Image (cartoon, rainbow, N blue to C red):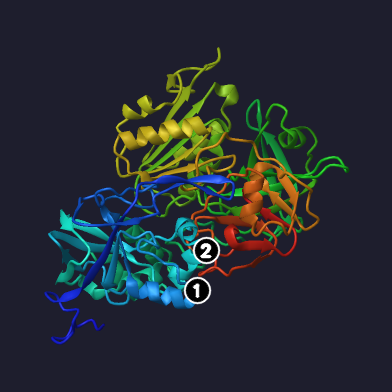
Amino acid sequence: MSGSGLSEADPRQAGGPQGTLLSVNVGMPRDVSWHGRTVFTGVFKDPVMGPRRVGKLNVDGDGQGDRAGHGGEQRAVFVYQIDSYRYWERELGRDDFVYGQFGENFTVEGLGDDEVCIGDRYQIGTAVFEVTQPRVTCYRVGIRMNDPRIPALLVSHHRPGFYFRVLAEGDVQAGDAIVKLTSGPEEMTVADADALLYLPGHTRRQLLRAVRIPALSPGWQASFRALLEEGQGSGNAGLAVTSPPPAWPGFRPLAVTAITRESDSVIAIRLEDPEGAPLPAARPGQYLTLRVPRDKDQRSLLRNYSLSGPPGGGFYRIAVKREHDGAASGYLHTRLVVGDHLDIAAPRGTFILDPTDAPVLLISAGIGATPVIAMLQALAQGQSDREIWWLHGARSSRDHPFAVEVTALLAELPNASAHVYYSRPGSNDVEGRDYEGAGRLTASVLAGLALPRHAEAYVCGPTPFMDEISGGLAAIGIDGSRIHTEPFGPAPGLTPGIAATPVRAPHPPAGTPGNGPTIEFSRSNLAIPWSSEYASLLELAEACDVPVRWSCRTGVCHNCETTLIAGNLAYSPDPVEAPADGSALICCSQPRGDVVLDL
């Protein structure tokens, strides 16, 4: 298809019949047993006879089990072609397909993915539709097809199918002609849009074409914009936000050159290259992974600590809070001395200060101040004239690390203000000097501060604090895409459609231990020998109840992309696009040796 439009003789021209609606398929979500778990899914559709009403959100009698990934106004009707049925019958050697086999609402003759364009409009029966996006691949179509490879095959073979938005509600039925009304701008086919997001080769010209299509769904628009902003970096920024490539692989020894007390429970540890060379600059907000030694007969502990020093200072500084019964913090507080060496992985993390001129909110509680102090350091170094709000909550001055340092940094910035709250001020704490108000830093406090609505907000602290503050920021009108949080422990999992089960702390898997390489889950404090009984690192993590994120399970969606702290991996099956440098797609990877994952 050329950019000049369709020729007069082309049967796909607007106003001409494009094909036929062969079957209307609907199904309400139901529980399905899968690998010992229960999946709530609407992927099973059955044909219906006679006229069927199509509304703004779906076909009458149809439903979706996971509204985050399917359904809604932009994905009201899913379309798949009988030509692709015939293709997959040949490709897979199957003859058992029935209408609705691919979870589609409309089975159609014509409307191939290599012909239909995003933004094309069609009339079927008395309803009018607009093409909004290709199908989002997920594991549930593999359940319906009884073939887990299907999500990846739909993408790699350029046959994803597509979604309609309903412009005018109406009635449709099998046998209706499909009439094209108008062509979408840019004439980007469904197959081309799908490949542009999921497959290698995200050319700037094609990305710019895609974001100019008004009908393209907001989610896909955002993905293509992320790819434009990322440029030619490794991985797929349209599918996953990943840490910048690490400055070195695995771990290297760094020397402890200073230990200072910053509060009753917090010490700062300065780390430098043993030979005196400057350390690679970290991004403001990143963290280090440490191997904390223990007694000789005990395995070392892996812990993540946010960097709190100037990002380009040639050295690293971390802050460690002494935790009750904390083995790692106990060692660092009581046994570590200047001159010791610690094995350190390179700075990593995606909680990174943005480079824009937008106002910035640095919001923290307790030890959560550490990554935002690094951001404040970077702003001061750059003599930033951004509007900066420093908001911090602590119990008292005895629990307020880096207070003097922060005050000095804020004094260097022309448009900075500070708001500090003590929940239990000490007898020597003076309101107006040490803190602004007594009480916790809460969402209601934020509501009274007239914070700029177009600010970028960085929030760090205990999970309940981050949840409340994030909700408070959203309530005053700050868009969710501008609210950034940094959890200290395991990140929340994403297991679409899986029925909720009681939360269990990460643990070794049941059964006989494996005898393969050691797999360490750094945030979960687990080290597990690999067993070939597991098809992937994802399966091992699930067996250990380590929180994980996934959707396709075949190397397409990148939801499972995880920071690879150390080690090398093999892939089977190969992902449709490789992960970013220093990351792993755990759904389709296996270890080649000992591995450390940031899970």
Drawn side of residue 438 relative to residue 117, left or right: right
- Nearest the camera: 108 or 428? 108
- Disc 2 crowd rating (10 Å Cα; few below 14, some 14-19, many 20+) is few
* Identity of the residue drawn at 50% across and 19% down: 423
Q: Which residue is mark 1?
A: 92
Query: Whole-percent x and y of residue 81?
Result: 32, 70
Drawn side of residue 322 relative to residue 217, left or right: right
Are circles 2 and 1 on residues that touch, CB within 8 Å? yes
Which amino acid, by three-letter code, is at mark 1?
Leu
- Nearest the camera: 288 or 226? 226
User: Picture quarter containing residue 115?
Assistant: bottom left
User: Picture quarter containing residue 229?
Assistant: bottom left
In the picture as drawn, the residue positioned furthest to the top comes out as 427
Question: Of the numbered discs in the image, which one, if any, rests on residue 68?
Answer: none
Give the answer, above or below, for where 61 lies relative to 13: above
Query: Whole-percent x and y of residue 551?
Result: 49, 54
* Identity of the residue drawn at 37% across and 73% down: 84
* Identity of the residue drawn at 42% across and 31% down: 468
Q: Earlier in the sequence, mark 2 or mark 1?
A: 1
- Where disc 1 sits, the SS reads helix
Question: Of the numbered discs in the image, which one, if any, rests on residue 147?
Answer: 2
